[in-house]
Amino acid sequence: DAKTTQPPSMDCAEGRAANLPCNHSTISGNEYVYWYRQIHSQGPQYIIHGLKNNETNEMASLIITEDRKSSTLILPHATLRDTAVYYCIVRVEAGGSYIPTFGRGTSLIVHP
Amino acid sequence: DSGVTQTPKHLITATGQRVTLRCSPRSGDLSVYWYQQSLDQGLQFLIHYYNGEERAKGNILERFSAQQFPDLHSELNLSSLELGDSALYFCASSSPRQGGNTEAFFGQGTRLTVV
């Protein structure tokens, strides 16, 4: 089972920042938070990940709260092409492996 | 382009048949994961291989099996196909890093339609 909770849907105006929240209150100390997105039936695309510090790359920024129980993915200037399902995941340990386990994600619609 | 290659992209077959889906991981990646995504459903983890060995199983039916070969490519075999097996099947790969915390990269999937 996924260890994260996300709102099922959000919308955002083109050019504005999209802030996607995620709750991961049961995260353990050495578990990273990963964000992926899936654009209609394509393969999920890795966006960013972090442990406890805020992270930024060319796609997005990730803000993790100090207690690490929640995080926010920020798309600073959303475009129509950012319309996708966004998944926040914490890997689930199984048989010594860490398995990316997906919940239902947040469906982000960017409108003109 | 994630560097993960899946073939075929589309597959249409009849109930009761058997098919094989192929995945070539990114160069150097030892881990391969398989997922199933049915219409309007989330990504369901099926199975994980690491350097040729099965490491973890998820919600994989007994009619399904997989293997990872010495060159690290992987195949997912689906047999006695049913209409409900129609889905997108994704493969992902990742490389080992301390603590197992590595990002996984996904292929573009194989769309299987069972008629």
Image (cartoon, grey):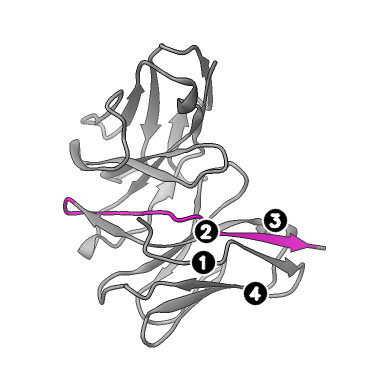
How far apart marks 3 and 1 lie (CA) works out to 21 Å
Q: Which mark is residue A81?
A: 3
How far apart marks 2 and 3 lie (CA) works out to 17 Å
> Which percent across, then down, holds residue A25?
37, 76
Q: Disc 3 or disc 1, which is closer to the eye?
A: 1
Q: Quadrant of residue A106?
A: bottom right
User: Where A33 sits versus B110, above or below?
Assistant: below
CB contact under 8 Å: marks 4 and 3: no
Where, quadrant-wise, is the C terminus of chain A in this rendering?
bottom right
Which residue matches tag 2?
A105
What amino acid is at disc 3? Arg
Which residue matches tag 4?
A76
Crowding at dot 4, Cα within 10 Å, few <14 / some 14-19 / many 20+, comes out as some
What amino acid is at disc 1? Gln
Where, quadrant-wise, is the N terminus of chain A in this rendering?
bottom left
Q: Disc 4 or disc 1, which is closer to the eye?
A: 1
The answer for which chain carries disc 3 is A
User: Where A36 sits versus B51, above or below?
Assistant: below
